[in-house]
Amino acid sequence: MDKKLITIVYSPAFFSGVLYFLLAYFTPRTQFGQLFTLVSACFILYVILCRQSFTFGTGLGIALVFRLIFLGAYPNLSDDYFRFFWDGTLLVHGENPYLHLPSYYIQYNLIPIVLTSALYKQLNSPQYYSVYPPVCQFIFALVKVLAPENILTYCFLLRLLILAAETTSLLLLRKILHLLHLPEKQVWLYGFNPLVILELTGNLHFEAFMILALLLSIYLLLQHNTAAAAVTFGLAVNIKLLPLIFLPPLIKYFGWRKFILFAGLVGGIILLTFIPFISEAFISHIGESVNLYFQKFEFNASIYYLLRWLGFKISGYNQIALLGPFLGLVVFTTVFYLTKNLKPGNSDLIKVFLISLSVYFFLATVVHPWYITTLVALAVLTRFQYPLLWSLMAFLSYSAYQTAFYHENLFLIAMEYSLVFALLLYELKQPQKTKPFL
């Protein structure tokens, strides 16, 4: 290979690999200064790499090597994997993971061989019922069968599945870019993105599987294979409920008659995967979990925090119980408005998906960094760059974990959203500007 090419491509790739190694094995989330410094350096190298020219095979190899670095590591920015292990254990033992709180199994000493008090203490939400949809539960159980006892082996095997999902997503992004007549190299905006690498492969978040199913659905839609697109869309919803926000744009995309058929298939897939778990208690617990999400949880929000501050000024207490559902209603009203000018079969569908999901996050009470990975995937298929900037700025939210007492730095959150909003407004006003990333 040409020495100049080696210098241009492999030098930033090598240094990125070193940084990912440090992030994987030597950077707990309590070390915010170290975390954000290393991630920022990764982001600079990410921009440099995305501007280089190389074959798809070379780029895919680099993207996979970055992810393989994490194979032997525990997730160090998230402890959700303990709940994955817990729920998977329940399902393997014939228990419905939606029916009881974790404390129930500890109190009555049920399944004592694996569901120990030590594992229970590692759960970050022992007081809440499981919120993970059925496809997630089946994956938890599958990996649990393969790794009955050891948590690190469990993480290793789950990472292999995520690695396979990520590889397939990159192949799909390439195909979709060809169909949209966009530059193939835009695929690396996702493949080399530090947030995507750290949060999906590194921290085992199931957005990796949801993004795969969503991209497959988009690809099938562009191929006019409506039935198969509905099936994969239903699977995406059964991994994360988030894709439900894309249904209003699909009404305009299909027209009502075709949409009803599409939605019917989606609903059938959702029902089919939920059937093994359905009971009166299950429905009650799912409803309770959804209410808690919109009426209690707060993290890295933007507009909601401004409204919360105003609510304190007016009433003297937190108005989240009212603001959460109200903002949810505003989201769906806004999404319907965004679809007003979308014509059946319009190629702007992906753009509407991107803006609709962004509106949801801008108004949400909880925006964890890994949520932005879906925006990054959609941004690859459009001209928008603000999700790429957000993929860096979202790491500012980890400042909340610097001490044992969770405390958000509102100045850093304000900085995060100010920069993201500024770039979004610029892009909306200057739609013909060239992507500086490429």
Image (cartoon, rainbow, N blue to C red):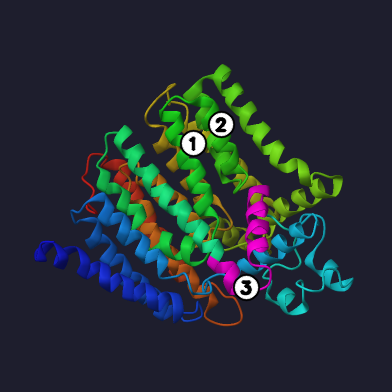
Q: Does residue 326 appear left or right of residue 410 in this picture?
A: right
Q: Between residues 153 and 179, which one lies in front from this camera angle? A: 153
Do the residues bearing badges 1 and 2 touch, measured as CB atoms within 8 Å?
yes
Q: Spatial distance from mark 1 to mark 2, Cα to Cα?
A: 7 Å
Q: Between residues 245 and 228, which one lies in front from this camera angle? A: 228
Give the residue pinned by disc 3: 151
Give the residue pinned by disc 1: 217
Q: Is residue 302 above or below residue 220?
A: below
Badge 3 marks a residue whose secondary structure is helix
Report the magenta residues as a range. Answer: 133-156
Q: From the viewer's perspective, is the residue at label 2 or at label 3 nearer?
A: 3
Q: Amino acid at mark 2?
A: Ala
Q: How many numbered marks appear?
A: 3
Is residue 326 in view from this perspective?
Answer: yes
Q: Amino acid at mark 3?
A: Ile
In percent of width and height, residue 101 lies at 80, 63
Q: Does residue 421 appear left or right of residue 295 in this picture?
A: left
Badge 2 marks a residue whose secondary structure is helix
Q: Spatial distance from mark 2 to mark 3, Cα to Cα?
A: 35 Å
Residue at left offset 33%, top offset 43%: 174
Taking the view exactly as shown, the residue that stands out farthest to the right is 108
Residue at left offset 53%, top offset 48%: 210
Q: Is residue 245 magenta?
A: no
Q: Amino acid at mark 1?
A: Ser
Mark 1 vs 2, N-terminal side: 1
Give the residue pinned by disc 2: 230
Q: From the viewer's perspective, is the residue at label 1 or at label 3 nearer?
A: 3
Q: Between residues 86 and 430, which one lies in front from this camera angle? A: 86
